[in-house]
Amino acid sequence: MSEYESNSSVDAAYDEYVMPIWKSLNVPVKRAHGCTLEDFDGNEYLDAFSGISVTNVGHGNDAVVDAAKAQLEEFVHGCSYVHPNEPVATLAETIADVTPGDLQKTFFCNSGTEAVEGAIKLARKYTGSKEIVALEMGFHGRTLGSLALTGNNAYKRGMAPTLNDVSHARAPYSYRCPDCRGDGCDSSCADELEHVIGTHTSGDIAAVVVEPVMGEAGIVVPPAGWLERVQEIAHDHGALLIADEVQTGYGRTGELFASSHFDIEPDILTQAKGIANGLPLGAFTASRKIADAFESGDHLSTFGGNPVACAAALATIEQLQDGLVEDARDHGQWLESELNSLEEKYDAVGQTRGLGLMWGVELVDPDETGPRGVAPVPDSDLASTVSDHLLEESAIVVGVGGYYKNVLRLQPPLTISREQLERVVAALDRALEAV
Ligand SMILES: Cc1ncc(COP(=O)(O)O)c(C=O)c1O
């Protein structure tokens, strides 16, 4: 029985004992099932954000819970790098099977940021080079290495110095691109990467790190040909392409991995979030040739590849392959046309964009021109007001993010029903009308 009997008692304990890391906390959760969250006052909410895009096969998924429970009883920990065990072996083999290209060997850790850190070490070890290029507005985590790659100083203030020798190239954010201004983008801005390597680096590049769809930047989907050109430039410079699929992986975009939407083969692919439906697990996977650059002692994690988390991951992948990825794709097509209608209906909806069940609704003040004279000015206040309205009037949880904090993020569990999605769209329509 919980000691906390109300939302306010949990909030009070947070105020007193939990470090203040976030400006506005969302609803406290006592329990969750499917796409429903229940708070400590007994209220229910439709979750359209999945705990920041994690519970892809639904909260409290029976198969995942059963697999984790069975493994809990069998064997919880021995350090998977000291004691080889079946969940790690089976999961590594499964990942080799389901990831794109010839990605073959996996290192397991506990989070997305750790996966990114490990991938950088591997790229350095394999190439013998040191420097990294990432994207402006990209997000790769909060530890000092991954924070260096994160292209947004909102996350870095007061935290420098981070890793040296990281440069940033322009993000494929065509809606706010000063060159193509959203019209007739031909992805030529990918060539900017060549310019950045030429001007900001010594040329000793270990990796170019990209999110195939940029999550925290505001669900930025690169235009056709962009990622392919970035891969080409990276390889021309002897650098590896690291696809950070921490947020896009495991079915989120209507493919098991978002890299499959493009004609690329990542050299290293990072994973976390949806991999184990909420149990802490991160991973990075590389081809045999690249992975074997790591020698004994180069990398390790005490909890990495925890058998319980790996058992949960296996159950998660099984269900994703059993129709949920296709469902995400179908829902995404429906959502695209619904959100396009809202974009046409409301001037304050600047752009809607996404793939599968990863959608952003960018809100703007239509009467003022935005940064660099491109597109209307981002309206972060409107985004928080709409999100509050959705929560208070319709009991729907969405995310608010984007580089300008003006993008509503719809990233529900992939198990969401069409009827529940209709509820989200109708509530969004009402909220936009009301505010
Ligand atoms: C693309 C990407 N990489 C890395 C991370 C960091 O993951 P974690 O919060 O699990 O450390 C995130 C988290 O949002 C992410 O979206």
Image (cartoon, rainbow, N blue to C red):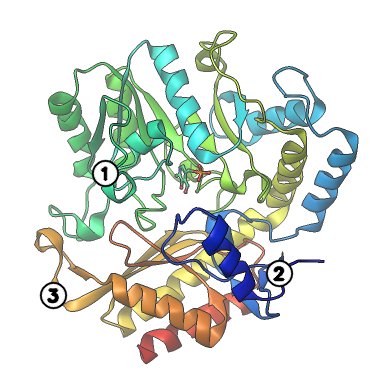
The residue at which mark 1 appears reads as: 136
State the SS at label 2: loop
Residue at point 36%, 58% (across, down)? 218
N-terminal-most mark, 1 or 3: 1
- Can you give x and y, in whole percent of width and height, for residue 72 in the image? 84, 40
Amino acid type, mark 3 = Glu
What's the mark number on residue 4? 2
> What numbered label is drawn on residue 368?
3
Residue 31 image position (x, y, % from top left): 72, 67
Residues 192 and 402: in front is 402
N-terminal-most mark, 1 or 2: 2
- Ligand 1 neighbours mark 3 (CB distance < 8 Å): no
Nearer to us of marks 1 and 2 is 2
Mark 2 crowd level (few <14, some 14–19, many ≥20, 10 Å Cα): some
Label 1 to label 2, Cα distance in Å? 42 Å
Q: Residue furthest left?
A: 373
- Looking at the image, residue 433 lies above or below residue 71: below
Left-right relation of 148 to 323: left
Q: Position of residue 198 (x, y in %)?
A: 15, 24
- Which marked residue is nearer to the observer: mark 3 or mark 2? 2
Residue positioned 57% across, 81% down in the render: 395
